Image (cartoon, rainbow, N blue to C red):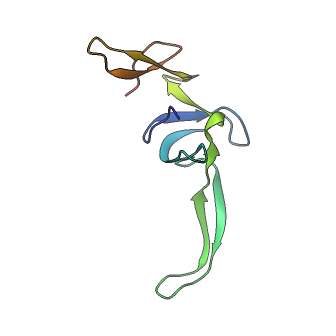
Amino acid sequence: MKFKTGDKVVVIAGANKGKTGEIAKIFKDENKVIIEGVNIKKKHQKAVQGQEGGIIEIAAPINASNIAILDGDKASRISYTFDKKGKKIRVATKSGKEIK
């Protein structure tokens, strides 16, 4: 997976298409990511000793194929190149800028 925690991404497919956010967590085995403020679902939480019950909102995972990295205001793919020292760096395909 070419995405990292903290990357700014845009959803390019699905019910949340067009929403942007920052990657909070990555599930490499399932090829899914959790994006802050996107794909919010309501969960009914049962009261446990010391915690209150109720309806809480959580961010559900999105498949990594449905997101793209934000390059300025546009969605872009990620490619790799090598710098002069031989270190592998991530590059936005559309602009050619390095992704930090």
Instruction: Give the residue at x 32% y 21%.
Output: 87
Residue 43 can be seen in this image: yes
Image quadrant holding the C terminus, namely: top left
Residue 18 can be seen in this image: no
Instruction: Give the residue at x 45% y 38%.
Output: 4
Nearer to us in this view, 31 or 47: 31
Q: Quadrant of residue 19?
A: top right
Q: Is residue 79 left or right of residue 39?
A: left
Nearer to us in this view, 31 or 19: 31
Q: Quadrant of residue 18?
A: top right
Does residue 72 sit above or below 42 in this rendering? Answer: above
| Residue 8 locus on image (x, y percent) | 48, 35
Q: How many marks?
A: 0
Q: Is residue 13 left or right of residue 32?
A: right
| Residue 70 locus on image (x, y percent) | 52, 27
- Residue furthest bottom as drawn: 49
| Residue 42 locus on image (x, y percent) | 66, 63
Instruction: Give the residue at x 42% y 40%.
Output: 6
Nearer to us in this view, 17 or 26: 26
Instruction: Give the residue at x 58% y 80%.
Output: 53
- Residue furthest left as drawn: 85
